[in-house]
Structures are given as structure tokens and as C-alpha cells.
Image (cartoon, grey):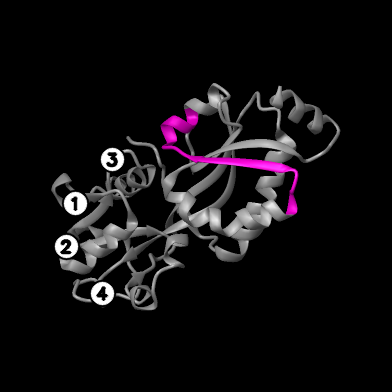
């Protein structure tokens, strides 16, 4: 079988074969363009098969071995899965000019208390992270969450229409147009952040290829994200 061929390659120390990778949608759009080209040039014998799933599905697929590894926000506290952090990605606020917080150069979590926050719809772990961030500070009641969308692009447009502010993962802000970058407001230290990790089952056999993938991703992301003073916000729904 293909899987056995890959395992034999592992034992010979050859980095080659097929690697099935699952990735959450809020990470894939910004992370894949950063590392995919570099990885495929460096490891020509590896056939990467990448699919997007939500965190719950990723965990299940890792446990039943239908994927080899996954990239998701952690910690998930699943004792069948090994989590190896790749990077810590701060949340950044997107505050339109007309909003009362736009005069602040930096924001505090407390500043979110009176703001109508636009968030991703249910099923996204980034949404859970935001809800946990707000509930941790016990400021936001449910009626603050007026509009839920499936994409960051929609949230940005809604914010620009005067419907509130939104929070974006740092890597997503790098691709914004210059006029939109002026509306970004970082948080004071320790910055709220999500931990993004490479996950695989404790029984996983393709460790050589997974390690090669991790090395490429951490090398690339180190150049894009240089934050040390962060507070990790859980991606799990409470």
C-alpha cells in the first residue's frame, strides 16, 4: 500500500511519499501562500494533499488516520494527539475611521466592552477564541454580537459600513490594502493571540515528513511574526 511505501521510505531516512494535511480555514488562506512553494521546491519527492476542515473534523480524522497531520489553533487537550506549536499569532483590531476607538493608537481588551463586535459564524475556532477573549474579561453580553459572517473580508466591509469593529489574525492583516492597514489597532502587551500548531496522532508513522513540514513552516513564519509577549487564548468553545 502507499502508506507502507511511505513508512519504508521513513525507515531509510528518505523524505518522500504522500502527506495528507488538514488545515483550518482561518489559517489556510494566509499560511499556505507563505510556505507551500518553498516546501515543494525543497522536498520534490513529497506529494502534499491539503484539505480544509474545521477543528472538530480534523481531530476526528487524525484519530481515525484519514489524514497524517493537521494545522490548527491549539491547545485542544486531546490526549490522543500530539501538538507541536508552530507560531503565536496576535489578534489585531480593525477599527474604521468613524468609530469612537479610532483615535486610540493601541487598544486594551477592556476597550471592546462598548463596541459592537463583528465575528465569524459558528463553527470557526477563531470565533471561539474571540468569545473566550471577551468572556474572560466578562464585559460583553450576547447582544453585542450582532452580525456573524463566514469570512474576514465580509467582516471588514461590514465594519467599513459603520456596523462595528472586528478582530483579525495578524497574518491576515499583511495582505490588506494600505488604506485598510491604517485602520488596524494592535493590543497592548500581553497581546491576545492564538497558538497555531502542527498536530498528529501518537500512532503516526510519517514523522520524517511531518518534521520536514514543521521546519519549513517555522522558518518562514519566524520572518513574518516576531511577537514574544502574548497571552494564548483558547480556541475551544466553553
> In this image, 63 relative to 235: left or right?
right
Residue closest to the far right: 12
Q: CA distance from mark 1 to mark 3?
A: 11 Å
Q: Position of residue 133 (x, y in %)?
A: 33, 49
Residue that carries the numbered disc 2 in the rendered image: 163
Q: Identify the residue at horizontal 45%, vertical 43% (top origin).
A: 24
Q: In the rendered view, tell whether residue 102 sits above or below residue 145.
A: below
Q: Earlier in the sequence, mark 4 or mark 1?
A: 4
> In the drawing, does residue 97 fall left or right of residue 84?
left
Report how many numbered discs are placed on residues in the image: 4
Mark 2 or mark 4, which is nearer to you?
2
Is residue 54 shown in magenta? yes
Q: Do labels 1 and 2 touch, CB within 8 Å?
A: yes
Q: For this view, does 55 lie left or right of residue 223?
A: left
Pick the quarter of the image with the C terminus.
top left
Image quadrant where residue 184 sits: bottom left
Proximity of marks 2 and 4: CB atoms separated by less than 8 Å: no
Q: Which mark is on residue 122?
A: 3
Dividing the picture into quadrants, the one containing residue 106 is bottom left
Local SS, label 4 = loop
Sequence order check: which comes first, mark 3 or mark 4?
4
- Magenta-highlighted residues: 42-59
Structural distance between the alpha carbons of marks 3 and 4: 28 Å
* Residue picked out by circle 4: 102
Which residue position holds label 1? Answer: 147
User: Quick one: label 2 or label 4, which is nearer the N terminus?
Assistant: 4
- Residue 234 lies in the magenta stretch: no
- Secondary structure under tag 1 reads loop
Amino acid at each position: 500500500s502507499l502508506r507502507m511505501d511511505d513508512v519504508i521510505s521513513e525507515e531509510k531516512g528518505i523524505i518522500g511519499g504522500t502527506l495528507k494535511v488538514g488545515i483550518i480555514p482561518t489559517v489556510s488562506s494566509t499560511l499556505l501562500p507563505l510556505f507551500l512553494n518553498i516546501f515543494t521546491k525543497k522536498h520534490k519527492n513529497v506529494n502534499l494533499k491539503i484539505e480544509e476542515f474545521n477543528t472538530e473534523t480534523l481531530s476526528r480524522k487524525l484519530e481515525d488516520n484519514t489524514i497524517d497531520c493537521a494545522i490548527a489553533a491549539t491547545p485542544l487537550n486531546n490526549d490522543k494527539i500530539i501538538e507541536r506549536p508552530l507560531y503565536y499569532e496576535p489578534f489585531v483590531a480593525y477599527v474604521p475611521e468613524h468609530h469612537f476607538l479610532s483615535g486610540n493608537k493601541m487598544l486594551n481588551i477592556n476597550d471592546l466592552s462598548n463596541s459592537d463586535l463583528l465575528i465569524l459564524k459558528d463553527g470557526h475556532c477563531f470565533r471561539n477564541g474571540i468569545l473566550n477573549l471577551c468572556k474572560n474579561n466578562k464585559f460583553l453580553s450576547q447582544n453585542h454580537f450582532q452580525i456573524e459572517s463566514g469570512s474576514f473580508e465580509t467582516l471588514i466591509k461590514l465594519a467599513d459600513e459603520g456596523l462595528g469593529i472586528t478582530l483579525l489574525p495578524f497574518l491576515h492583516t499583511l495582505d490588506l490594502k494600505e488604506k485598510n492597514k491604517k485602520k488596524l489597532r494592535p493590543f497592548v502587551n500581553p497581546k491576545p493571540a492564538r497558538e497555531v500548531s502542527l498536530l498528529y496522532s501518537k500512532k503516526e508513522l510519517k514523522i520524517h515528513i511531518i518534521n520536514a513540514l514543521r521546519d519549513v513552516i517555522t522558518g518562514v513564519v519566524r520572518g513574518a511574526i516576531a511577537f514574544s509577549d502574548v497571552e494564548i487564548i483558547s480556541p475551544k468553545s466553553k
